[in-house]
Each structure stands twice: as structure tokens, then as C-alpha cells.
Image: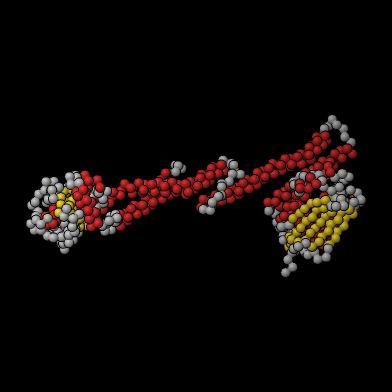
Amino acid sequence: MGETVWYRSLYWRIALGFVALLATLLVVQVLVFLWMTGRMPDLFPSRTSAQLAAAIAEDLSDALTGQPSIDLEPYVTDRYSSSHRGYVVVLSTGAVIVSPRVPPPPSLARAARGRLMGARGGPDSTPGGRDFGGRRGRGRDDWGRGSGRGGDRGPGLEWGAPIPGSAYGGPGGSGPSGFGGGPSTEYANIVVDGEVVGVVAVPQEPPPLSLALRDLGPTLAVVALSLLGAGTAVAALVIFRPTRRRLHELQKAARALGAGELAVRAPESGHDEVTALSRAFNDMATQLELRTQALENADRTRRQLLADVSHELSTPLSAIRGYVETLGMRELPLDEATRRRYLGIVNDESERLEHIIGDLLDLARLEGGGGSWRVEPVAVSHLLERVRHRHAPAVAEKHITLTTSLAPGVGELLGDQNRLEQALQNLVANAIRHTPTGGRVAVSAMPGEETVILRVDDTGPGIPPEHLPHVFDRFYKVDQSRTGTLLPSGSGLGLSIVQAIVMRHGGSVQASNRSGGGARVELSLPVASTS
């Protein structure tokens, strides 16, 4: 059902339409050419009818003068067989020679016979005509008619009978002379030794259009077919073949894309509709490839998240289960101190498990755009004060220094105060966790370009360069590189939550190492408008 019907194919419609148009133009050109040639005084105007009659008469006069016994019929036929005008040669011997290529009018021979009788002084003679060989006549009479009587008969042809195969219609007698010559006939006398021995008659009218078609038809047909074939070949090579090739490439690319080859692209050569179609296809393929890659990355992240969550949850669950089973063993005597210690471990692991689950839910809400947000101006000084009070016990226990500084010109932040405080608290807690005893943690705020920059520096061992691109990934830990710390490792979700909060506020977060040692995490958050 999806197969292309050949007569509805774009290629066939264009090709057939082009060929039909070319053929129509050729036919019209041929008809116009033939119409123009048919309207000319002479089909082939190399000589007029008078010139042809004079040339034949003079030629025959010279031939009879030089060779009186010559057979004129093959002589005339051989020399004037290519003439495109009809003619009649009437001799005094009664012979009649007609043009083989273009038969003259039926009554032209009778008119020429009358002209010959008049030139020789016979009954009803009328002076006129052109003499060649011995003398010149006074030219054609006013009516151009012959003066012979219609009943005379020659040995070769009946004078009044139609000439077989005439191209000029049926029996004559149409002229006022009664001989059918009419005023549109040219005559010339054949003169030998001063005596008129024959007359040449040539009609002035051009041959009918059918004769031109008969003569020119084969040549014009060959030329037309050659032009049609050449035009079709040129159109196929110049127009259709490149277009078909590019459309075929586009078809192959579409099939490859449907088969899952996302990197395939169609050629974009040329500047036509096929190029625009190929460009649109390539844009679609690029978007599809990007979306497929995003889905693959999301699926890979999901699988990694499930593996990480399973691993992080299995550790406290295994500890809880092990200690609970130990406490439940009646055959194992446990003193009160050991029992309380085991119960404390179970309690700590339960809190750790609850903390991981809470962080996971919190991160899911942040990345999914859920949860309630209250966007308002937030004073940076208030955030720094909250951080200092919140972590005072931890820094006192580890004997480290926590400092906060606020640069002049720092404006208010625009966002949710609780979430911004959560992000800053996570960064400070992470810095305290990885700062050795006697170290220092510094929290500073400075103005940026339409932003406020919050910076948390510590004097810990820093972050290995190969781990810097991954510190904000879920469950990513570099504790093995943080030697000298006393606090246990966190869930591995703290920096991921920080990144989600900052990005939700339209800011950015970056981790680096300080030149003097230690790690630095920098937040860039939009400042509240002062207008």
C-alpha cells in the first residue's frame, strides 16, 4: 500500500511534463516554419518561375542546336529532377515533358500547346512569349494565355487531359484563355535556328503545403526527434539525475535513522528544495540524537543511583541486623554495658539510614522541581551568622577556627532563605569534616556582576584533580584522600543537594583547590534587584 505508483512519482511527472512541453514546442515551431514557407512566393526562392522557365528553354535550345537528335525527356528529367517547381515542356514534335518531382496543373500542357501553336503562326495565333536560341519574342501577352485549339492532339499526351499525379488539383480550364494557363504562368520559347520548336511553361504559384511536408517531413522529423532526445538526455543529466541522486541519499539516510543509526546525515549540497529538506532532516536527526543521548545518560544515572542507594542503605541495614540478632541470642550472655553499646550502635545506624533516605527524598524534590519555595530577598549577613552559630560546637570540639567575612557592597540574595541556608550549612559541614585539628575554615561573601559570591575555604588536604569533576555527583566520596580527619564520612549527597539548590536559584557552583593548600567551593547566586 505504501509503494509508489509510477505515474504519480515526482520523477515521472517532471520528466513527462518536460518532454511533453519540449515536443509541443517542436511541433509548433515546425508548423510555424511550414506556414511561413508556404506563404512565400517561392518555396525555395533560389530562382523565380520566370527564371526557371528561361533557364530550361535556353538550356534545351543549346542542347538541340548542338545535338538535334538528343532525347530531351531523360535530359530534362536528369537536369531538373530536383526542382521544387512544376514545369511542362511541349515540343513541336508533339512530345510533352512534365516535371517528375512536382507535377504541374492538369491544363498547363494544353495552355503550353496553344502558346507553341501561336508562336509558330498556327490558327488563332497570338504573338508573345520569350524566344531563346535564335530570337527573342515580345514577352508574355496581357492575359498570359496560349492560342492553340483544345482539340489538337500530340503523340505523347492528350492536350486537354489532366496530367496524372498533379499536385495542383483536378482538371483545369480555369483561366480566361480557356487553356488553363491563366495569368499566373510564365512561358519561354525554345528556339533552334530561328524557329520555335517548343515552349516551357512554369506556374507562378508555389506548390501546395503537402509537397513541402513530403519533402521536408523526414528531415524535420529526424531533427525534431534528435532535438527531443538530446533535450531529454540533457534534462535527465543536468536536472533529474542530481536531484534523484540526492533524494536517494536522503531516502537511505531516513531508513538508516529508522534502523537506529543516529549519527547518519543526509548530504546538504545544492541550494534548492531538496537541500532544504535534507537540512530539516539533519536538524531532526541531531535533535533525536541529543534526546537519545540524554535518555541514555538518564538511564545510566538511574541505574548508577539504584546501585549507589542499594550500597549506601545496605551498610547500616547490615549493621542493624547484625547487632539486633546478637542482642536476640539468649545463649550469648551480655552484660548491661555491652548491651547498651550495641543498642547505641543500632540507634546510630538507624539515624544514618534515616538521614540517607531524607537526603535522597530532598534531592529528588529539588531536581524534579517539586517542594514549596518562597522567593524573597535574603540578607547575606544573616546567613553567615546562622552558619557561625550552627557549627560552633563542632569547631570547638575539633579545635579549629571558623571565620566569616562580608565584603562591602554585597547586596541581598534573591531566593528561599531556608534552602540557601541549607546549601551553605552543607558546605561548611563538609569543610569542617575534612579539616584536621588546628585547621581553619573561612566563609566569605563578596559582590560579583549582578551576583553575590559565597566562598568556603578550608585548610584540609584538598581534592585530587582527577576527582574535581565528580565531587557533585551522587554518593561520590573522596574520603580516602582526606587523611587526618576525625568525623565519619557523610552520605555522599551533601554536595549534590548544594548543586541542586544553587541551580534551582539560577546560580552556579564550582569546586577547586587553593594555591596555599586546602579546598575551595564557590557559589554564585543572583542578587536581589535594588529598584
At 80% across and 64% down in the image, what residue appears?
410
Is 515 left or right of 293, judged from the image as shown?
A: right
Picture coordinates of residue 356, whole percent (x, y): 76, 45
Q: Nearer the viewer, residue 278 or 387?
A: 278
Task: Tell which residue pokes out farthest to the bottom in this image.
Answer: 531
Q: Nearer the viewer, residue 263 or 210?
A: 210
Instruction: Farthest residue to the top: give it.
Output: 331
Q: Is residue 114 visible?
A: no
Left or right for 298, reference 188: right
Q: Residue at x 83, y 51 (%)?
A: 513
Q: Residue 166, percent across and down?
A: 19, 50
Quadrant (top left, top right, bottom left, bottom right) of the N terminus: top left
Which one is in front, 287 or 57?
57
Tell me which colouring the rendered structure shows.
secondary structure
Residue 530 location, quadrant: bottom right
State the residue in front, 132 or 86.
132
Going by the image, does 3 lie left or right of 398?
A: left
State the count of labels.
0
Residue 165 location in percent, x, y?
19, 47
Residue 14 in view in this figure = yes
Q: Quadrant of the C terminus?
A: bottom right
When the figure is inspected, residue 378 is found, relative to residue 70, above or below; the finding is: below
Residue under the point 12% across and 60% down: 126
In the rendered view, does 494 fall on the left or right side of 194? right
Which residue is at a point 82% across and 41% down the rendered structure image?
346
- Residue 148 found in image quarter: bottom left
Q: Position of residue 117 (x, y in %)?
A: 11, 55
